[in-house]
């Protein structure tokens, strides 16, 4: 069945750095040869487009103002209408094994699976806090998650990551595709809708990619402000499947235990970042009371607020 599936790889880009070169090399090293390879570039001013062309990718260019997490990925899905499985990578995600693509595509041997996402490993040289985040969120065991599993794992049932995720295109079409007006979380929003429709979300631990970020506490504040905005706009997801609260508390305890053993000097930084996350998230939940000019300053996704209708 694996050999019968037409697989498309999609990478949205904007001024990719050295990690993008590694990302392209990781795709080229795969044992599975994709049917299509597409880069959607938001008007890069460096060598990103030339590098993608040299690696054999088709190129679609858009203006930076036209980019949105959901809308751009949906447009890509429409461009690759001849593919059965769509695999999305971010430009800083590096497939860690020549089998990573084949492994994530194999997830769709189960007809219930609409969405699959791979295991993220910290980039080489990642700091302890980022190493822990990957260890906590991406375990060693694969897991099929359907709506019934929400009683046990809550909001984790729709957890996904757009850095390395795959979608059954027929289900994407059936359910109306990615939502175009989302600040972030287009992957999880679609996963939640697919669960509601009776499909499953699959975590494939065998499909691995290097991907991590060393965010500062102001970046964490802005990132979690955006998460709060997303949750406020999509309250139906936590109403239906459960909240993030328990998982967040477990993460903090786990992080402190991990740092106590591996890097105790990082504990004050971890606590500061936790405070920044909580404050940013709670403010994001209340964004409707804030002026658009302030939301642009507080958000990591400033372009989302360009339209006055966003306020």
Image (cartoon, rainbow, N blue to C red):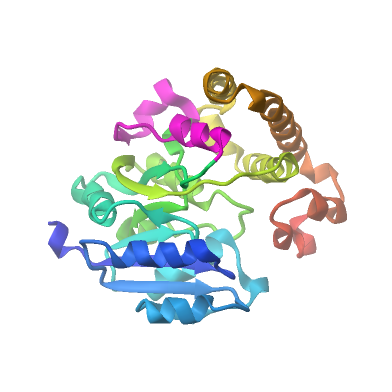
98 or 113: which is nearer to us?
Answer: 98
Question: Percent x, y for residue 267?
Answer: 66, 24
Question: Percent x, y for residue 156?
Answer: 46, 32
309 lies above or below 119: below
61 lies above or below 75: below
Q: Quadrant of residue 170?
A: bottom left
Question: Percent x, y for residue 178?
Answer: 48, 58
100 lies above or below 4: above
The magenta segment: 127-155
Residue 77 highlighted magenta (yes or no): no
Question: Percent x, y for residue 252?
Answer: 59, 23
78 lies above or below 97: below
Residue at 43%, 45% in the rendered image: 191
309 or 48: which is nearer to us?
Answer: 48
**Placement of the N terminus among the 4 image quadrants:** bottom left
Residue 154 highlighted magenta (yes or no): yes
Residue 241 seen anywhere in this rendered image of the structure: no
């Amino acid at each position: 069945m694996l050999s019968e599936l037409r697989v498309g790889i999609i990478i949205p880009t904007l001024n990719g750095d050295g990690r993008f070169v590694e990302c392209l090399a990781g795709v080229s090293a795969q044992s599975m040869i994709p049917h299509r390879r597409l880069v959607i570039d938001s008007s890069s001013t460096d060598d990103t487009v030339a590098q993608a062309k040299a690696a054999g990718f088709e190129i679609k260019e858009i203006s930076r103002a036209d980019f949105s997490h959901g809308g751009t990925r949906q447009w890509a899905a429409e461009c690759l209408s001849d593919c059965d499985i769509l695999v999305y990578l971010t430009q800083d995600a590096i497939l860690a094994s020549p089998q990573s693509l084949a492994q994530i595509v194999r997830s769709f041997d189960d007809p219930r699976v609409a969405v699959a996402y791979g295991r993220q490993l910290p980039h080489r040289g990642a700091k302890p806090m980022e190493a822990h985040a990957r260890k906590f969120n991406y375990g060693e065991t694969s897991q099929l998650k359907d709506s019934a599993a929400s009683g046990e794992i809550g909001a984790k049932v729709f957890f996904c990551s757009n850095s390395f995720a795959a979608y059954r295109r027929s289900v994407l079409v059936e359910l109306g595709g990615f939502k175009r007006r989302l600040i972030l979380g287009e992957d999880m929003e679609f996963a939640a809708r697919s669960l509601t429709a009776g499909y499953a979300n699959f975590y494939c631990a065998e499909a691995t990619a290097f991907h991590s970020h060393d965010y500062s506490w102001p970046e964490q504040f802005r990132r979690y402000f955006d998460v709060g905005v997303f949750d406020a706009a999509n309250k139906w997801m936590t109403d239906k499947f459960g909240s993030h609260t328990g998982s967040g508390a477990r993460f903090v305890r786990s992080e402190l235990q991990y740092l106590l053993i591996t890097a105790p000097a990082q504990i004050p930084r971890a606590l500061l970042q936790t405070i920044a996350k909580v404050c940013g998230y709670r403010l994001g939940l209340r964004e409707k009371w804030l002026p658009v000019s302030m939301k642009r300053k507080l958000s990591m996704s400033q372009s989302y607020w360009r339209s006055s209708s966003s306020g």
